Image: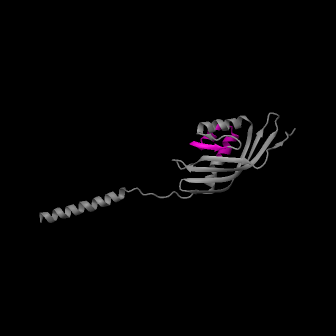
């Protein structure tokens, strides 16, 4: 009788342990795909930061180890260097920036955005220079769920146009 109770207790203990350990297994679920709106938010926030002349806010939209691949210039790597790069653009006279997402998708925590931009700069004579082009942004979802850039590349459609100052 004691051996049957001991055996029953041992079986109960083993079953309880198995159930307990199965609940400890990590449940992995793929993040749901991001919307085009979510993926394009990074660049909309970026354009707002440039117009506000806030290079720090612009740089904070990039991962710490992100890289820019600007046209006709060396690659710029690291958030601090990206901030310096965009401060140079602000200091050069950026007065307007708009972006439009044309395509975007994600798979897990990685995504991309392709779009068009218009950048307006004021030169030393007061003329507005308009640069229109396209861009590709490779994005990752950070620990808070926000999409940030890991690589950004762009180029102009044509040589920038100068609009004379209206008197």
66, 38: nearer the viewer = 66
Query: Where is residue 15, by image quadrant?
Result: bottom left
Is-magenta flag for residue 54? Answer: yes
Q: Quadrant of the C terminus?
A: top right
Q: Quadrant of the N terminus?
A: bottom left
Q: Would residue 110 appear left or right of 159 to someone viewing this image?
A: left
Is-magenta flag for residue 112? Answer: no
Which residue appears at 70% of the width and 38% of the height? 89
34, 111: nearer the viewer = 111
Q: Would residue 83 appear left or right of 21 to someone viewing this image?
A: right
Is residue 54 at all visible to an observer of this figure?
no
Query: Where is residue 22, by image quadrant?
Result: bottom left
Q: Position of residue 90 (x, y in %)?
A: 70, 37
Q: Position of residue 95 (x, y in %)?
A: 74, 40
Colour theme: one colour
Q: Would residue 135 appear left or right of 141 to someone viewing this image?
A: right
149, 155: nearer the viewer = 155
Q: What is the residue that sits farthest to the left in this orientation?
A: 1
Q: Position of residue 141 (x, y in %)?
A: 55, 50
Is residue 134 at all visible to an observer of this figure?
yes
Count how many numbered circles sit on residues in the image: 0
Which residue appears at 64% of the width and 41% of the height? 75
Q: Is residue 100 above or below residue 162?
A: below
User: What stretch of residues is rendered in magenta?
Assistant: 45-69
């Amino acid at each position: 009788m004691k051996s049957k109770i001991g055996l029953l207790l041992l079986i109960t203990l083993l079953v309880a342990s198995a159930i307990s350990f199965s609940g400890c297994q990590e449940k992995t679920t793929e993040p749901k795909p991001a919307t085009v709106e979510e993926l394009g938010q990074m660049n909309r926030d970026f354009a707002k930061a440039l117009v506000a002349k806030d290079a720090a806010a612009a740089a904070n939209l990039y991962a710490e180890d992100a890289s820019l691949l600007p046209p006709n210039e060396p690659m710029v790597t690291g958030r601090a260097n990206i901030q310096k790069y965009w401060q140079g653009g602000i200091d050069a006279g950026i007065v307007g920036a708009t972006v439009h997402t044309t395509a975007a998708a994600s798979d897990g925590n990685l995504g991309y955005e392709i779009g068009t931009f218009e950048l307006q700069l004021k030169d030393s004579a007061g003329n507005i220079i308009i640069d229109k082009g396209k861009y590709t942004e490779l994005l990752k979802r950070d620990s808070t769920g926000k999409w940030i850039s890991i690589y950004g590349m762009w180029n102009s459609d044509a040589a920038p146009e100068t609009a004379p100052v209206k008197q």
